[in-house]
Amino acid sequence: MKIGEYKATIYDDVWRTIVHDFPNLLIAFVNELFSESYSKDARVEFLQDTHEQKMPDGTVEKRITDTYFRIIDKDGTAKKYHLECQSTADSSMLVRLFEYGACIALDDAVQENNRIVLEFPNAAVLFLRSNRNTPDYMSIELKTPDGSISYRIPVAKMQNYTIDIMFKKRLLILLPFYLFVVEKSLKECESDSDKLAELLNSLQTIVKGLDALLLLGDIDELTRNSILEFSNMVNTHLARNYAMVRKGAEDIMGGKILEYEAKTIYQNGVRLGREEKENSMIISMLKNKLSLEQIVTITGLTMEKIVSIGRQAAVL
């Protein structure tokens, strides 16, 4: 398959939109993929994602990367990254990654006298679907007259990320694709009310988790609402053959933010101290039947503190 024939899906569109509208969400994902330690204060700067390549017959073909950017740390150091989001296995993926990387390297080439320096970006792939044959990383090897050069391409697999992990590591950029994690069970959920209830409870946990981060000030309301909107777009398409699943997911993730005292105070703009916000949030989550373990994962607070707050408020 020629690269020019590659067709984007709704999942590609969601990925590109959330990345470009909320670039700060990329930082935690890059830390996860490349074992980096960027702080949330690092800056993401998007780079040219369309590149032209001259073919042997003289024609010019365009190469469009999913996500090409640099992260500039607080000390001014910067690295370039190229990420691709792939919904299904594609035998041309490595070829595309190399061609994209080569185009980027040529665009940014530094030529000095009789020497040219080509810098390839750090590259990685997110597979929304995977199986036992999906590798943890891929590699590209270049054989030159003076020896071989190779580099690894990390592979992220949605199936490896539970809701708890996504909140604990702040991989919020993956939340819209959660239904891929349980995709194989959708048919069973459609015909089994208990399984459906379990799935919908998981989606409710995502909503409550985002509400908690909103109250903590870790995200704003636009980020919270957009993640849920992107989730609805993915869910509607992925569960298009399962009416009960689709309707249940839409009812939960398309709803309004839960109204409770802490949220009302927050919306009215009252400046509470962080401790007061945490207390109100914990009480609300306990009232909404989240388990202690879920609250620990979402908030990062200790079990002892959560239990103490719950007992003082007579919730536990």
Image (cartoon, rainbow, N blue to C red):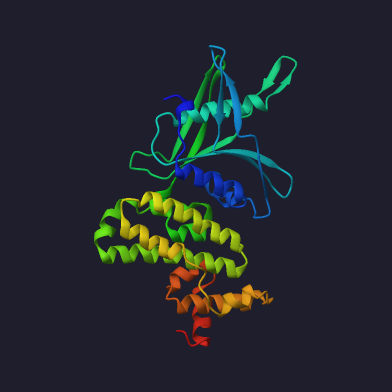
Left or right, 178 with reference to 70? left
Image location (x, y in percent) of residue 42: 68, 50
The residue positioned 66% from the left and 26% from the top of the image is: 107
Quadrant containing the C terminus is bottom left
Closer to us: 183 or 314: 183
Q: Quadrant of residue 268?
A: bottom right
Closer to us: 174 or 222: 222
Left or right, 290 with reference to 39? left
Residue 78 appears in view: yes
Residue 300 appears in view: no
Q: Is residue 298 above or below residue 144?
A: below
Image location (x, y in percent) of residue 31: 57, 49
Give the total number of marks visible in the rendering: 0
Quadrant containing the N terminus is top left
Closer to us: 135 or 232: 232
User: Residue furthest toward the left?
Assistant: 191
